[in-house]
Image (cartoon, rainbow, N blue to C red):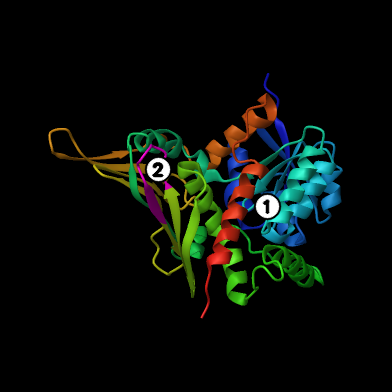
């Protein structure tokens, strides 16, 4: 009989309540949640009762010391990712680390060092879009038939996030009841990461750059990670623009074929109040276009699909829409992680892989010009 992985959840906020806890419940043949921890006692008690979790605590050490926990899900805010991932590894636990791995290059490198020193424990970073069936199958298959890419676009303009959460059917409670000093500790942790992300004398730290750092850690890590799996690392960043609630960049790439030249990837992301979750990666060739479209992961049953437009050998225009799987990306991701932690499968979204996103963010910070 296949073993069931015993999970400890660190962070009982929105993503835990709307996504991870429901998915883990549906995958009860693979996972069981044994412990949950949050600085908010109200959130901890709510989740422990709703999801029938044996241990609820506000002390992370209780979770790390629990012998009934095999893997810790680090679902806290970004500035604490390194602290809790390293602590979990030192306690002899595997880690599922929600993206971003962290907000600075040195911070991610410390996570990698802790993983190497852990005696075989592993870190799996939660880039769920890279596990969607339509990305792994239809998109990659169709992309491989474009001999020379002429242009590509990454877009993530997601509309009013709160509307999708409110209509997800999961009824999450808002975080409340924070202990005294929590906000100060959070700001101090952020300041330490900002100092590393924007080294003195190398990158001038500004409020606009801090905003970009947080945005890239949120939406941006999804987009840049997906772009990397599709095209690899960019040669350079041509430019970056940051305005109120929106950010854009142009990346320079080279085609892999001899003499095929270069192409640009434009990246555009931000927030508005139109409830249309517009997240996609589009690739243009001379005779073919391929687009993968993601919908809000907070609404179950919305498939990821691929659209193909191409000129056939007879000169006709052919359009196709492909859904490789109706399984949501978070479920696919958790199934893959199980195989990695139990059966030794290669982790493609490792901490070392995630470091590449921070290197791209650094390229963007250095190209960003402010008025």
Nearer to us: label 2 or label 1: 2
Looking at the rendered structure, the secondary structure element under dot 1 is loop
Q: Residues under labels 2 and 1: Cα distance?
A: 37 Å
In the depicted structure, whether residue 200 falls above or below residue 256: below
Of residues 282 and 109, the one drawn nearer to the viewer in this rendering? 109
In the depicted structure, whether residue 273 falls above or below residue 216: below
Task: Specify whether 348 is left or right of 307.
Answer: right
Task: Specify whether 95 is left or right of 131.
Answer: right
User: Residue 271: percent from the left, percent from the top?
Assistant: 46, 67
Residue 11 visible in the shown view: no
Extreme-front residue of the structure: 259
Of residues 214 and 278, the one drawn nearer to the viewer in this rendering? 214
Extreme-top residue of the structure: 1
Magenta region, residue range: 254-265
* Residue 255, disc: 2
Of residues 222 and 239, the one drawn nearer to the viewer in this rendering? 239
* Residue 238, disc: none
Snapshot quadrant of residue 76: bottom right
Snapshot quadrant of residue 257: top left
Q: Which residue is drawn at 63% across and 27% down?
A: 345
Q: Residue at x 66, y 57 (%)?
A: 13
Q: Residue at x 71, y 58 (%)?
A: 43
Where does label 1 land, which residue? Answer: 75
Snapshot quadrant of residue 347: top right
């Amino acid at each position: 009989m296949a073993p069931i992985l015993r999970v400890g959840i660190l962070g009982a906020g929105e993503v835990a309540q709307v996504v991870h806890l429901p998915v883990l419940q549906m995958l009860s043949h693979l996972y069981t949640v044994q412990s949950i921890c949050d600085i908010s006692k109200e959130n901890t008690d709510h989740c422990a009762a709703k999801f029938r979790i044996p241990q609820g605590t506000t002390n992370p050490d209780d979770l790390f010391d629990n012998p009934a926990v095999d893997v810790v899900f680090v679902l806290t805010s970004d500035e604490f990712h390194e602290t809790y991932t390293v602590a979990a590894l030192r306690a002899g636990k595997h880690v599922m680390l929600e993206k971003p791995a962290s907000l600075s290059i040195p911070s991610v490198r410390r996570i990698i060092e802790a993983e190497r020193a852990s005696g075989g424990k592993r870190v799996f970073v939660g880039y769920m879009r890279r596990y969607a069936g339509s990305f792994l199958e239809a998109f990659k298959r169709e992309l491989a038939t474009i001999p020379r890419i002429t242009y590509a676009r990454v877009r993530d303009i997601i509309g009013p996030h709160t509307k999708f959460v409110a209509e997800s059917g999961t009824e999450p409670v808002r975080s409340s009841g924070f202990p005294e000093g929590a906000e100060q500790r959070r700001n101090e942790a952020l300041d330490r990461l900002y100092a590393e992300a924007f080294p003195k004398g190398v990158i001038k730290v500004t409020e606009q750059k801090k905003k970009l750092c947080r945005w890239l850690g949120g939406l941006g890590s999804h987009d840049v990670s997906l772009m990397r799996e599709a095209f690899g690392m960019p040669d350079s960043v041509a430019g970056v623009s940051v305005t109120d609630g929106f950010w854009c960049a142009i990346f320079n790439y080279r085609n892999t074929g001899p003499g095929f030249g270069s192409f640009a990837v434009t990246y555009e992301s931000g927030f508005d109040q139109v409830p249309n979750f517009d997240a996609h990666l589009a690739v243009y060739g001379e005779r073919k276009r391929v687009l993968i479209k993601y919908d809000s992961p907070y609404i179950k049953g919305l498939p990821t699909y691929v659209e193909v437009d191409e000129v056939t050998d007879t000169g006709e225009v052919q359009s196709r829409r492909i859904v490789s799987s109706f399984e949501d990306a978070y479920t696919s991701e958790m199934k893959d992680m199980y195989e990695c932690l139990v059966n030794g499968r290669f982790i493609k979204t490792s901490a070392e892989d995630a470091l590449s996103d921070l290197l791209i963010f650094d390229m963007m910070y250095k190209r960003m010009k402010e008025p």
